[in-house]
Amino acid sequence: MNKILVTGACGQIGSELVVHLGREFGRENVIATDIEKPSQHLKTASTFMYLNVLDPHMIAKIVVDYEIDAIFHMAAILSARGERDPQAAYEVNMQGLVNVLEVARRKKVDKVITPSSIAAFGPDAPKENTPDNTALNPTTMYGVTKVAGEKMLQYYYLKYGVDTRSLRYPGIISAETAPGGGTTDFAVDLYIHAVTREPYACFISENTPLPFMYMPDAIKAILQLAHAEPGRLSRRVYNVNAMRLTPAEIVASIRKYIPGFRCTYQPDFRQAIADSWPHSIDDRGAREDWGWKPDFDLDAMTRDMLEKIRGKFTIL
Ligand SMILES: NC(=O)c1ccc[n+]([C@@H]2O[C@H](COP(=O)([O-])OP(=O)(O)OC[C@H]3O[C@@H](n4cnc5c(N)ncnc54)[C@H](O)[C@@H]3O)[C@@H](O)[C@H]2O)c1
């Protein structure tokens, strides 16, 4: 990996990934792209340009012009937004991925790294310690596109030898960039409301367990997978796990530091999405093949989140 294209770089994960890539490979070697305006942060860390992943010619042009040899494909429409507009989710998540894979095949890009999600699992998968290989029968359009995307990655690897790599992220919690319309966004909202001293009405019920990961671990995981020796990979798509948390457990952790934080529960349509997903993930494959291990547990994450959000809101 020398010259890197990142799609969806303004998103929750892309915006932090680009900072790490910029540090490792140099600003001029990281081409960050999105259809949104970049933050100053992003512009400092990378060379930014507009790219709609539904435009295959523009993807090809950037790959040729900048001699790209690795693509981190992060552009997507997530679960909750996807249920509001399933056709848009299908188009961006499926056609966008196919466009990236086709350019990678035709222009001989070495590597394509793109996240999948626990949304690939449906209600018939085991709820606890869901394994890498199990039923993939999602009930959301987002999940449908993630399963189809995983199969596309496998296909381009087997048929064309494109080095495709993916990891099934759980809900990602972060302080820097707002999440973009997922079912686990409430977790970030809880921390922000606690710091701004506002009560929060959580849209997922208090005892719903879901798998989560703190952003520094999410970045560590995708970079570790991207750097792994090809011979160590026994599969294209890996489960990665960090914490099994309910909203009530996150609230209890926040209250250790902000005792007065008030939270009520008003589940909406996103509860059905959460109920269709696993509670915890078996990530032995990732641990055995490329040494995956998260650093953050709930209280370590809470301390770090509160400190970072306080910094952003300049509240003492
Ligand atoms: N955040 C999570 O909790 C989570 C969990 C599991 C998997 N993932 C996966 O990680 C990846 C990144 O997710 P994220 O949380 O950063 O998402 P996000 O919604 O925060 O960001 C996605 C970005 O894609 C951009 N985008 C949308 N349509 C586009 C288009 N047509 N062309 C170019 N860019 C476009 C958006 O402007 C946005 O900046 C996605 O594949 C997502 O499915 C995320």
Image (tube, rainbow, N blue to C red):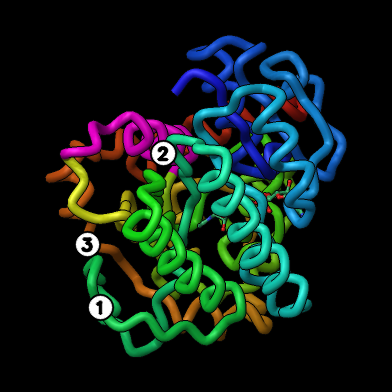
Q: Is mark 1 within 8 Å of ligand 1?
A: no
User: Which element carries disc 3, helix, strand or loop?
Assistant: loop
The residue that appears at 67% across and 84% down in the rendered structure is 269
Residue 60 vs 244, above or below: the answer is above
Q: How far apart, in angstroms, are the residues tagged by discs 2 and 1?
A: 22 Å
Between discs 1 and 3, the one toward the N terminus? 1
Check disc 1: other Cα within 10 Å, few if <14, some if 14-19, many if 20+.
few
Disc 1 designates what residue? 134
Q: Quadrant of residue 11?
A: top right
Quarter of the C terminus within the rendering: top right
Magenta-colored span:
214-231
Say left or right for 76 vs 304: right
The residue that appears at 46% across and 59% down in the rendered structure is 116
User: Which element carries disc 1, helix, strand or loop?
Assistant: loop
Q: Which mark is residue 222?
A: 2
User: Which element carries disc 2, helix, strand or loop?
Assistant: helix
Looking at the image, which is closer to me, 97 or 37? 97
- Res. 171 visible in picture: yes
Q: Point out residue 237 in the picture as x, y percentages from the top left corner.
A: 33, 57
